[in-house]
Image (cartoon, rainbow, N blue to C red):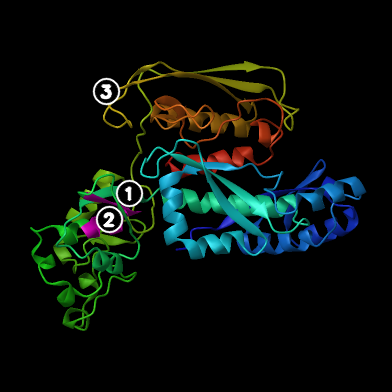
Amino acid sequence: MEFITNITVTVDEAYFKDRGRLEKILQLYASEKKASYYTVRGTFEEVENLSIRLSKMKDRSDPVTRRQTRSQGERASPHVKPVEVSGVVMAYIQQKCAEQLGKIQGSSFVIETQPEPGTVHHDTRSTVRVTFRSHHASSTPVHADFVRQRFVTFYQRTASDLQVASIPASPQRDHKDLRRRFLHLLFEPGRNGGEMTVTGPFMHVAKLKEFLSPNTPSLSKSPEDRGPVDTPSGGTSGPSSTQGKGPEEDPCPICMEPIETTEKKTLRCKHSFCKSCLKRAFDYKPVCPTCGELYGALTGTQPDGGEMEVTKNTSSLPGYEKYGTLTIHYYIPSGIQKEEHPSPGQSYEGASRTAYLPDSSEGRRILALLRRAFDQKLIFTVGRSTTSGRNNMVTWNDIHHKTSTHGGPTHYGYPDPEYLSRVQDELKVKGIK
């Protein structure tokens, strides 16, 4: 389950005393210097190797700075902004993806979660704050940023395929057997004793529902007869797995039964399913249940009646001094929540937001993509505000905007040389490209 490929990090030469040595190290990587900082692109293995090498270099020569760095010890890195994430998704990652989480944080960092006041564990709208704490005072900003980017990438990919469902908590059902069979699912007691909450990838939740369905003949055998069903390859023990099967008899990753030739549907990503299983999966979300590739256009839960207007002015943004500025004005009116929102029938509070882009060719291209995302109701949603903690508010929907012209990334402003690239990646995940 490895979804992380290439990333980009920024290295500020102000944090290093020996500029000559820094330049020699960066020459070994795909780096480009812009003003007083470098941008470095590469695989996670390459960037991890770079971060380790840079961590061995001393920080700024100012002894006061070094003493402050030492005194910080194992506090959260001041160079890395915490991340607000879903409490449900983070609970799943911590319990079911501990190995991947360990690889992401490595030996130099610890990824910690801090529940927000008043959040409820079973509330799908609750959020937690994720911080990145360094074990070593010598850890560099590039190393901390590397860990953060790696976590965000893994979190987004995991969350995009996660589903929460409820199943009856029957006294006759052996829940230990279900946990043994469905290793990728997280089973927890529900709010009342009559149900259990199940969290996991859509494909595995669908397999659980098929397993529990009394109307599915292939699932009528006893657990001892069926053997494990939650295996990565889809193979099961017993006679059926030892018979020689042609390529058309490979099991469907959703129902785990052989695919009949006339019922086989192969996507452009080369993954095959039963037509009926794939239709049911696409009714939930138009993505491949195996790899997550998007098919068709996603439609979000942004409330109706919103407006997106753009104005131009000649003033420039830090880092884009040659260009003017594009100012985006969003307006979402207040209204009543619909079925796709957290609390149907209740009112929600609207929002007015302003964002900024450079009036360059790349900035105009991003603007066109943002307009498409707005038209597909992907820019905003209704939920819990991470700033005020209030529910039933119009909030951003995981497509980051620069809401300030200055202040850098920590203040949602410029300069931020990798912002346009990052937001383009965020839009691509939602099928906007």
Query: Mark 1 is on which residue type?
Result: Gln
Measure the C-alpha gap from mark 3 to mark 1: 23 Å
User: Percent from the top left, x then y, of residue 68?
Assistant: 83, 47
Could you tell me if residue 324 is visible in this image? yes
Q: Which residue is mark 1?
A: 163
Q: Which residue is mark 3?
A: 345
Which residue: 86% across, 50% down? 67
Q: Earlier in the sequence, mark 3 or mark 1?
A: 1
Q: Which residue is mark 2?
A: 205
Q: Are marks 2 and 1 in contact (CB under 8 Å)?
A: yes
The reply, left or right, for residue 169 in relation to residue 189 is left
Q: Which mark is residue 249?
A: none
Q: The N terminus appears in which quarter of the rendering?
A: bottom left
Q: Which residues are magenta?
A: 195-208
Measure the C-alpha gap from mark 2 to mark 3: 28 Å
User: Percent from the top left, x then y, of residue 319?
Assistant: 74, 33
Measure the C-alpha gap from mark 2 to mark 1: 7 Å
| Callout 1 secondary element | strand
